[in-house]
């Protein structure tokens, strides 16, 4: 139980294009999902908290117009990196809140912007 | 504010030896504590968690951790290391007050020497 998937697992795009990453909770409903970014050999940095049916809450320093988050259903949240640039290349990981205290993580999406 | 400190960014042990990964936390309210494992290019997998009750928590893959309030610690141990334990380990904390935002430690990379 408590499986979270991400799609795609790996994406390469040209600078200036937009990329959408999906995060799905497969066997449970998640009113709250989280999006993280992880740089090489570093810990996870929380980007935003995504709540179903409402606007996401972004962490300080994260551009909400660049990283668009939509949580349209209890099993799906999407992160769109708009007008991607090479500095946006990173490993993006989502998690879904199961119950009240445990986050279950997706396998991550490796984004490379050329 | 809550924070997590993981002592030692790299730990090396011989196969069959004891694994000890250290985690200390600070929190103004009773914490919920977690250990996650991350294999290369993958998301995080929950190893174990402490919320309330028994302070010695057993997790998957033979790992366990003990919550010591007096020492503000939640160290992760395994009696006998296996080659498959080589990975990055993250300690994390959330408030018990209902807000699910997670604070991660910087991670400890475990190397198992044959």
Image (cartoon, coloured by chain):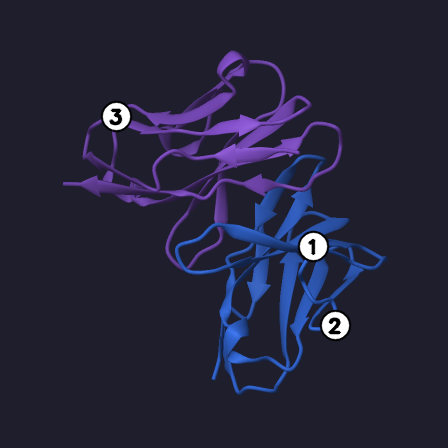
- Quarter of the picture holding the N terminus of chain A: top right
Image spot of residue B114 (x, y percent):
14, 41
Q: Looking at the colours in the rendered structure, which chain would you say is drawn in blue?
A: A
- Label 3 or label 2, whichever lies nearer to me, is 2
Asked whether residue A110 is in view, the answer is no
Which residue carries the number 2 mark?
A65
Q: Is residue A74 left or right of residue A23?
A: right
The answer to the question of whether label 1 and label 2 lie on touching residues, with beta carbons closer than 8 A, is no
Instruction: Give the alpha-carbon distance from disc 3 to disc 2, as whole Å.
Output: 48 Å
- Mark 1 and mark 3 on one chain: no
Q: Dividing the picture into quarters, in which one does residue B37 lie?
A: top left
Instruction: Give the alpha-carbon distance from disc 1 to disc 3, as whole Å.
Output: 38 Å
Which residue carries the number 3 mark?
B18
Image spot of residue B48 (x, y percent):
50, 31
Which residue carries the number 1 mark?
A59
Q: Is residue B8 left or right of residue A37?
A: left
Instruction: Give the alpha-carbon distance from disc 1 to disc 2, as whole Å.
Output: 13 Å
Q: Is residue A79 above or below residue A42?
A: below
Which hue belongs to chain B? purple
Image spot of residue A109 (x, y percent):
52, 66
- Mark 3 and mark 2 on one chain: no
Residue at the right extreme? A53
Q: Dividing the picture into quarters, in which one does residue B15 lie?
A: top left
Q: Dividing the picture into quarters, in which one does residue A94 lie?
A: bottom right
């Amino acid at each position: 139980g408590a499986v979270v998937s991400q799609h795609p697992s790996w994406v390469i795009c040209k600078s200036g294009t937009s990329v959408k990453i999906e995060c799905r909770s497969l066997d449970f409903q998640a009113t709250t999902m989280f999006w993280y970014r992880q740089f090489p050999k570093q810990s996870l940095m929380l980007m935003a908290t995504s709540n179903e049916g409402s606007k996401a809450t972004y962490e300080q320093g994260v551009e909400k117009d660049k990283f668009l988050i939509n949580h349209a259903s209890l099993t799906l949240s999407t992160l769109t990196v708009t007008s991607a640039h090479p500095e946006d290349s990173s490993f993006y990981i989502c998690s879904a809140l199961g119950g009240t205290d445990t986050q279950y993580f997706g396998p991550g999406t490796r984004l490379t912007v050329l | 504010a809550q924070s997590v400190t993981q002592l030692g960014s790299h730990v090396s042990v011989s196969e069959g030896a004891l694994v000890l990964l250290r985690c200390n936390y600070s929190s103004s309210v009773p914490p919920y504590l977690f250990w996650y494992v991350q294999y290369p290019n993958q998301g995080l997998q929950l190893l174990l968690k402490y919320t309330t009750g028994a302070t010695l928590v057993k997790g998957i893959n033979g790992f366990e951790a003990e919550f010591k309030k007096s020492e503000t610690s939640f160290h992760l141990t395994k009696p006998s290391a296996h080659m498959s334990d080589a990975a990055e380990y993250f300690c994390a904390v959330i408030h018990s007050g209902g807000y699910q935002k997670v604070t991660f430690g910087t991670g400890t990379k475990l190397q198992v020497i044959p």
